[in-house]
Image: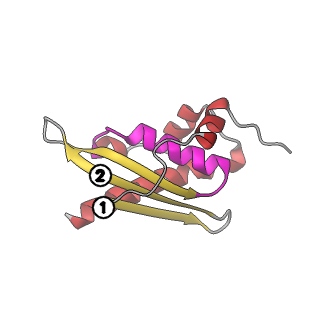
Amino acid sequence: MTQQYSKKVIEHFTNPKNMGEMKNPEGVGEIGNPTCGDVMKVYIKINKNKEGEKYIQDIKFQTFGCAAAIASSSMTTEIAKGKTLEVAEKLTMNDVINELGELPKIKMHCSSMAIQGLRKAIENYENKK
């Protein structure tokens, strides 16, 4: 059985956005899936907008995993960047999948992991304050 990836998944796998480690992050979220071996780390920096709401000023990720895991991490950072924490916390795996244009059913968990990593980074930030 071959896995068909959308052009957007291939694009985010071969040219991921916001990849790498962040110096002095304000929040870090790490998630791993022992079943598939994927491991993701999400780093965030927070700022306040004119209305005084906290938002994700910068976000980076490091992912050890398959094409879907890397693409999902990349897309999650693209969606979350610039969003308020309130909005970012409400993002779902379906938001990621819709932006990527589809994932094979067996790879759906990758988008969920990326969102969980983001939520853990926000939680880590909020627990420090």
Query: Which residue lies at the image location 56% right of the left edge and 45% below the top edge?
Result: 72
Q: Describe residue 27's horizontal placement relative to residue 95 as left or right.
A: left
Evaluate whether residue 26 shows in this view.
yes
Label 2, label 1: how far apart the Cα atoms are: 8 Å
Query: Which residue lies at the image location 44% right of the left edge and 44% below the top edge?
Result: 77
Q: Is residue 102 above or below residue 1?
A: above
Marks 2 and 1 in Cβ contact (< 8 Å):
yes
Q: Earlier in the sequence, mark 2 or mark 1?
A: 1
- Give the main secondary structure of the magenta stretch: helix
The residue wearing badge 1 is 24
Q: Secondary structure at mark 1?
A: loop
Query: Which residue lies at the image location 62% right of the left edge and 35% below the top edge?
Result: 11
Disc 1 crowd, CA 10 A, few/some/many (<14, 14-19, 20+): few
Q: Which quarter of the rendering shows the N terminus?
A: top right
Q: Residue furthest bottom?
A: 34
Q: Nearer the viewer, residue 14 or 43?
A: 14
The residue wearing badge 2 is 45
Q: Which quarter of the rendering shows the C terminus?
A: bottom left
Question: Magenta residues?
Answer: 64-85
Q: Nearer the viewer, residue 74 or 119?
A: 74
The percent position of residue 106, horizontal first and vertical second, equals 71, 49
Mark 2 is on which residue type?
Lys
Disc 2 crowd, CA 10 A, few/some/many (<14, 14-19, 20+): many
Q: Could you say which disc has been placed on residue 33 in the image? A: none
